[in-house]
């Protein structure tokens, strides 16, 4: 497989330990889920004045934003200039009355997957609920009908197949964090694992939720 060379002028965009790829690898835990869109909902729960649920059509009707960003997977691949379209978290939260105590979020997704984030990262300008990739609706393997995109963190913090967003007063570790992955997940700080974690061989990552 051809691995793209990195233009020296762009090398600053590639975090330590990463390899630039042209393709978009597909890695996940379990079977690709199927949905009945007549009953599918995105739920916002926890520290909100009133829990709310959005249909797919309601999300499509919200202001849509296009974004081009680099993405970085903990399995050591990076892809430059990926194009996404969807609802910015900042725009979504204009429709929700959050408690002032909400300092963290937990993203819930199939299959019983969770990823945690502090509110300041979750509400960054370039964080979105993606409905499209490269101008087309997400494919089932890449998270259709909805996935989170957090470009500044390793991609396990950008879950596919989102079902709910939980607003929390205190942090709680998600799926991979409880298994020794770094809680902050900054690729430019090489924050792959916590100090107590054991480095997992890449051939054991094949069926996990990383992209």
Image: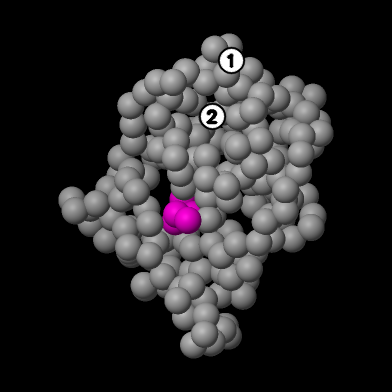
Image spot of residue 27 (x, y percent): 53, 56
Image spot of residue 144 (x, y percent): 69, 44
Residue 148 visible in the snapshot: yes
Mark closest to the chain's N terminus, 1 or 2: 1
Query: Residue at coordinates 58% horizontally, 70% vertically from top-left?
Result: 80
Task: Specify the quadrant of the image occupied by residue 41.
Answer: top right
Q: Tell me the residue that label 1 is attached to.
A: 51
Q: Residues within 10 Å of mark 2 (few under 14, many from 20)?
A: some
Colour convention of the picture: one colour
Query: Residue at coordinates 27% horizontally, 61% vertically from top-left?
Result: 199
Q: Which residues are magenta?
A: 152-156
Q: Is residue 196 above or below residue 62?
A: below
The answer to whether residue 78 is left or right of residue 76 is: right
The circle drawn on residue 165 is 2
Q: Is residue 203 above or below residue 66?
A: below
The answer to whether residue 101 is left or right of residue 151 is: left
Q: Quadrant of the C terminus?
A: bottom right
Rounded to the nearest angstrom, the CA distance separating label 1 from label 2 is 10 Å
Using the image as rendered, state which of residue 113 and residue 32 is in the foreground.
113
Using the image as rendered, state which of residue 112 and residue 191 is in the foreground.
191
């Amino acid at each position: 497989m051809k691995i793209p060379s990195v233009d020296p002028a762009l090398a600053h965009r590639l975090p330590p330990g990463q390899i630039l790829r042209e393709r978009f690898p597909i890695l996940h835990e379990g079977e690709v889920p199927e949905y009945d869109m007549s009953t599918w909902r995105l739920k916002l729960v926890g520290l909100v004045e009133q829990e709310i649920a959005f249909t797919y059509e309601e999300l499509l009707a919200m202001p849509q934003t296009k974004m081009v960003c680099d993405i970085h997977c903990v399995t050591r691949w990076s892809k430059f200039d990926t194009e996404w379209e969807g609802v910015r978290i900042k725009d979504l939260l204009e429709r929700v009355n959050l408690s002032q105590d909400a300092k963290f979020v937990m993203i819930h997704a199939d299959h019983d997957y969770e990823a945690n984030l502090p509110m300041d990262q979750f509400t960054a300008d370039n964080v979105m609920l993606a409905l499209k990739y490269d101008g087309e609706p997400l494919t089932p393997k890449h998270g259709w009908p909805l996935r989170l995109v957090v470009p500044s963190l390793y991609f396990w913090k950008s879950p596919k197949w989102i079902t709910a967003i939980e607003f929390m007063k205190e942090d709680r570790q998600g799926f991979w964090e409880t298994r020794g992955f770094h809680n902050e997940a900054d690729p430019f700080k090489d924050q792959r694992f916590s100090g107590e974690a054991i480095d997992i061989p890449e051939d054991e990552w094949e069926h996990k939720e990383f992209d």
